[in-house]
Amino acid sequence: MPEEKDMTKEYETLKKKYNLPELKELDKEFCIGKLEETTFLLRGIINKMNERLEQTLKILGDIIQPENNLANMYEAEGFSDDEKKNIFDLFKKISYYHKELLINDFTHEEDLAAELINKTFKEWKELKQEFLKILDKVKQYWKKETKSRLELGYFG
């Protein structure tokens, strides 16, 4: 039976080669988890990063244009049109990185993957702060004593 590779050591080698972020930091931001044995380690990391971006885009998209879902419709009411425009701007920025990561998954070149991991990681730290402010506003809206158009229509 072949010996299992230590992917953490593999990452440390790539980290030194490409000046990548600490694995612990990547894990904290993108839920990388245990590195599975693979030939394309950076591709696996990119996929995990993309999962986080997809989750973020879904939440933002539901605020910008809620589907026929009561919770999404209620949460969207908590934002003005100007705020939704700002949310859309954030949505666009995150979508750009999402597509870059996706393209790299299909064309995978290690040096470009490393560059993309660095760029996305750096930008994410700023984008995440904007996203967390939006999430906090959504959370606070649930605590507000309001008469939602949805409530008035549903019970009225």
Image: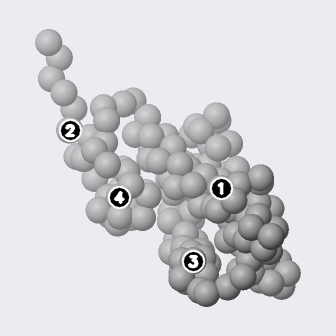
Q: Count of labels shown?
A: 4
Is residue 137 at all visible to an observer of this figure? no
User: Residue at point 39% right, 61% down?
Assistant: 26
Along the line of sight, the residue nearer the viewer: 39 or 25: 25
Q: Which residue is mark 3?
A: 142
- Name the front one of labels 2 and 4: 4
**Three-letter code, disc 1:** Lys
Q: Mark 4, mark 1: which one is toward the viewer?
A: 1
Q: Which mark is residue 58?
A: 1
Q: Which residue is painted at 22% across and 32% down in the image? A: 5
Residue 63 versus residue 67 in the image, above or below: below
- Residue 145 versus residue 95 in the image, above or below: below
Q: Secondary structure at mark 3?
A: helix
Q: Residue drawn 64% across and 44% down?
A: 102
Mark 4–mark 3 distance (CA, rounded to whole Å): 30 Å
Which quadrant would the N terminus be assigned to in this image? top left
Tag 2's secondary structure? loop
Residue beneath disc 2:
6
* 3D distance between C-alphas at marks 3 and 1: 19 Å
Q: Nearer the viewer, mark 1 or mark 2?
A: 1
For marks 4 and 3, the one nearer the N-term is: 4
Whichever of labels 3 and 1 marks the residue nearer the N terminus, that label is 1
- Sequence-first disc among 4 and 1: 4
